[in-house]
Amino acid sequence: MIEALAGVAAATVAFVLLIAFAEHLLSPRSLPAALIAHGTVPRRLVRPLAGAVTAVEGALAAALVAAVVIDAPRAVLTGILAAAGVVLASYAAYTHRLLRTAGGRAVPCGCSRADTPVSGWVVLRAGVPAALALLTALRADAVVTPAESAVRFAEASIPGLVFAVLLWVLPEAMIDPDRALEGGSHGI
């Protein structure tokens, strides 16, 4: 049972990072514009920070997928999951701080092509995969690789993808359910 849960959690984290990376690549202006609106980063650092965030998301997603697919040593998988957990937890902490200090004004989260404002749902979207990554890092030995069992790997990957997509569209769905059902601006 723990193998199934660990596999679904690892897949969810990988897909959330892949979706975030793709969203930032498809809309390279959304994160810099959001950071400017947040007013938390000096203007001269906005573009480099946005580029670094996108690169880290892509690198972590690729590393996590590769580590599982090639059956990397469990210490490597543990490290990648822990790093992903720390990055996602920092996103949750940042958006939580933003939510508390915004003074009632709506500011874009910059997470995607949608102009979703920062909300508790945005915090949750980062916090859930952060917790999944950190908890799975503790039991990385339980993540099933394709070499161990292609069927069990697929049984974890498919729900992981579904959970990642649901997490990703949750903030927008809570604001405008009809738009989210139509695929919104995410194209999902």
Image (tube, rainbow, N blue to C red):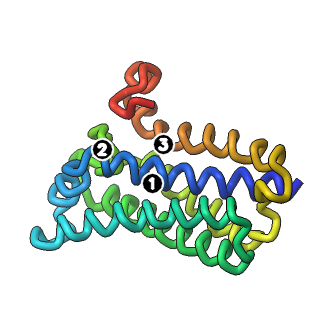
Residue 61 shown left or right of residue 11 in the figure: left
Q: Secondary structure at mark 1?
A: helix
Residue 144 falls in which quadrant of the image?
A: bottom right
Q: CA distance from mark 2 to mark 1?
A: 22 Å
Give the mark nearer the N terminus: 3 vs 1.
Answer: 1
Give the mark nearer the N terminus: 2 vs 1.
Answer: 2
- In the picture of the structure, the residue carrying the numbered disc 1 is 123
Amino acid marked by disc 2: Leu
Residue drawn at 50 percent across, 66 percent down: 60
Of the 4 image quadrants, the one containing the C terminus is top left
Q: CA distance from mark 3 to mark 1?
A: 11 Å
- In the picture of the structure, the residue carrying the numbered disc 3 is 168
Q: Secondary structure at mark 2?
A: helix
Residue 21 shown left or right of residue 65 in the figure: left
Above or below residue 149? Residue 168 is: above
**Circle on res. 26:** 2
Amino acid marked by disc 1: Val
Amino acid marked by disc 3: Trp
Outermost residue, right direction?
A: 1
Residue 159 falls in which quadrant of the image?
A: top right
